[in-house]
Amino acid sequence: MLLEALFVVALAQDPGPPQVTAAPTGQEAAATAASSEAPRPSRRERRADLVCENRAPTGSVMSRRMCRTQQRSDAAADSARVYMQDATRGGAHEEMPLGGPGPTPN
């Protein structure tokens, strides 16, 4: 019964008019051909741009080699730095702002 209802819903949907794509002009065709002919870097070149380290994933004791690009590695370090600053803000090493929780001055 559920299958029949699913078929009815699928058949009732209007697929809309068929989409017609225009043929590319000379410049568009040349740009597409040039971009598809661009040489891809070899695996060795791509691996040269990676920063690798041996880490244990969260919840595991087994370490594994994790490789990232330099940009992704820097972004993760910045994210961790911001998280630690937010987590330790207002701790014992900083004074509480006036009007915060605690006894009021007389």
Image: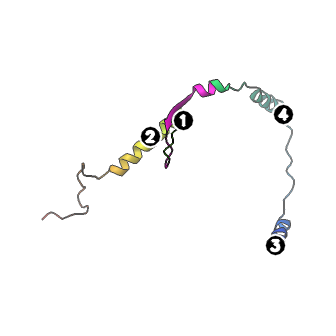
For label 1, the SS is: strand
In primary-sequence order, the first of circles 1 and 4 is 4
Q: Quadrant of residue 11?
A: bottom right
Residue with the mark numbered 2: 78
For label 3, the SS is: helix
In primary-sequence order, the first of circles 3 and 1 is 3
Looking at the rendered structure, the kind of residue marked 2 is Asp
Residue 3, placed above or below residue 95: below
For label 2, the SS is: helix
Residues under numbered marks 4 and 3 in contact, where contact means CB atoms less than 8 Å apart? no
Mark in the foreground, 1 or 2: 1
Q: CA distance from mark 1 to mark 4?
A: 48 Å
Residue with the mark numbered 4: 25
Q: CA distance from mark 4 to mark 3?
A: 46 Å
For label 4, the SS is: loop
Residue with the mark numbered 3: 5
Q: CA distance from mark 4 to mark 2?
A: 45 Å
Which residue range is magenta in the image?
45-59
In primary-sequence order, the first of circles 2 and 3 is 3
Q: As drawn, which residue projects farthest toward the front?
A: 62
> How far across and how far down the image is residue 99, in percent?
24, 61
> How far across and how far down the image is residue 12, in percent?
84, 68
The one of 61 and 93 positioned closer to us in this rendering:
61
Mark 3 crowdedness (10 Å alpha carbons): few <14, some 14-19, many ≥20: few
How many numbered badges does the structure rendering display?
4
Residues under numbered marks 3 and 1 in contact, where contact means CB atoms less than 8 Å apart? no
Looking at the rendered structure, the kind of residue marked 3 is Ala
Mark in the foreground, 4 or 3: 3
Per the rendering, the mark at residue 65 is: 1
Per the rendering, the mark at residue 37 is: none
Looking at the rendered structure, the kind of residue marked 1 is Arg
